[in-house]
Image (cartoon, rainbow, N blue to C red):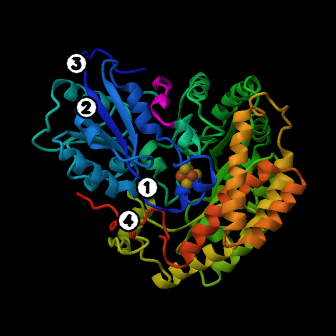
Amino acid sequence: MRVEGIETPRRILLVFPRYTSSFGTWEYAYPLTDGIKAFMPPQGLLVIASYLPESWQVRFVDENLRPATEDDFEWAEAVFVSGMHIQRQQMNDICRRAHGFDLPVAIGGPSVSACPDYYPSFDYLHVGELGDATDQLIARLAQDTSRPPEQVVLTTKDRVAMSDFPVPAYELADVKKYLLSSVQYSSGCPYQCEFCDIPGLYGRNPRLKTPQQIIAELDKMRECGIGDTVYFVDDNFIGNRKAALDLLPHLIEWQKKHGYVTKLACEATLNIAKRPEILEKMREAAFVTIFCGIETPDPEALKAMQKDHNMMVGILEGVHTINSYGMEVVSGIILGLDTDKPGTVDALLKFIDESKIPLLTINLLQALPKTPLWDRLAREGRLIHDDGRDSNVNFKMPYDDVVSAWKRCMELAYEPSRLFARYLHQCEYTHKQRLKVPVSPEMKSWKNIRRGLVMLRNIVWKVGVLGPYKREFWKFALGRLRHGDIEGLIGSVLIGHHLIMFARAASSGRQNASNYSLRLRDAQVPAE
Ligand code: SF4
């Protein structure tokens, strides 16, 4: 649905802020591709674009692809911005630039919803999800596009049901420039892990779209030329197991109809390993990756962070079960927990080798507002507000020891031979468990073959000839070539190269130890 009853035409500029370099920005992988420049198109702004009145013109700029220009600001009558905490400085910078053109600027999305006081310069704060606050914002701008004399805070009390969400305006995004496409089926998670802000922001009872909406979104993505992999950005794909089971047959049918050219990925709790009926259907729907927040292999630590559900099945056993359905596991890991000991990093490295998980996002603990962790640390006087640090937590172990442990962990986990050993397992075991699908005309199209050849050429030249770990690369690459596994070679090296290069930068202190840290970000983009 879109908002109705507004006739006044308006021109709205939607700007998504740039990310500065971090583990999840994948910038070392992009030069190996055929022109990819950014991670995922932003769902939130594209949904807003579809929700605005029909008579309103919309221009969308993702500053990860190009900066908003003078022409964009001159064209616009109002600017909308959205983003996460890590983009805070950049969001404030967009606001400053828009104010240079005397435009009213509204901010929505997860960061302002959790921390409105981070954004004192914006004219409109949209706190919460799509709903009555959105309607009020639209009504105000329909009446008047001058800047209000003081900040106006609009808070959603009545949310638009997800089953009424419009299809995101994927047509506005330059879709071929993204590594992944995204879709959202549900919002919210029934668990309450101590560090996580999802239950506080989006609730514990997952709200849902209908399977028909998801199929319409996938169809639209195909029309817009969206590429290989679609990521379900749901907080927990099995937050409502029945809903997951309702959706999967529709995805299977959609994949059959389109020749399985799209791979699927999602985030889910590790206890999905106890649900063979879900895993089997995910295999049939061509899910190839699940991100699981394993966080730590230490049971005592899992208990302390209220993540006991990770122990419903042995962690290594759970990872193996998921692999046996053809899906790679990507894992979140946290260092700096109260339960960490001097031997934690060694135990973690042992777990990484044994689990054979190639890609782990290893972060320092950060307390996010609206989490039980934030409240506890505030009570204990252990929150540190100092952007010069990599974390706002006063760890139980000395800060320098924790940061050194993180650097050591990054260096060893992404040592090339160690990483390629893990990828080899995925190629030789996990990938072989996947559904055997016939090669469709789209898969063997010249466009597809050309794309593969461009990536292969870039990989051979930039990693195999010019790269800093040639020996390990060729050992892995020749093995894959001997098996005719070009897909495994390209997929592993593309991501693996980023991991290796990022880890080298991290262990030498040139990267932050937390995706939330502002330490290196201040210098790059001045806030207003
Ligand atoms: S299971 Fe995941 S999404 Fe749910 S509360 Fe825990 S960390 Fe957050």
Which residue lies at the image location 75% right of the left edge and 37% below the top edge?
A: 286
Please tell me whether mark 3 sits on a helix, a strand or a loop: loop
The residue singled out by tag 4 in the image is 521
Kindly identify which residue carries mark 1: 19
Alpha carbon separation for disc pair 3 and 1? 34 Å
Q: Quadrant of the C terminus?
A: bottom left
Q: CA distance from mark 4 to mark 2?
A: 31 Å
Q: Is residue 353 left or right of residue 383?
A: right
Q: Depth check: give the residue in front, 433 or 259.
A: 259
Amino acid under disc 3: Thr
Mark before the other along the chain sequence, 3 or 1: 3
Give the CA separation, mark 1 to mark 4: 9 Å
Q: Give the number of the mark in front: 2 or 3.
A: 3
- Say whether disc 3 or disc 4 marks the residue closer to the N-terminus: 3
Q: Position of residue 254 (x, y in %)?
A: 70, 25
- The answer to the question of whether label 3 and label 1 lie on touching residues, with beta carbons closer than 8 A, is no
Comparing labels 4 and 2, the label whose residue is closer to the camera: 4
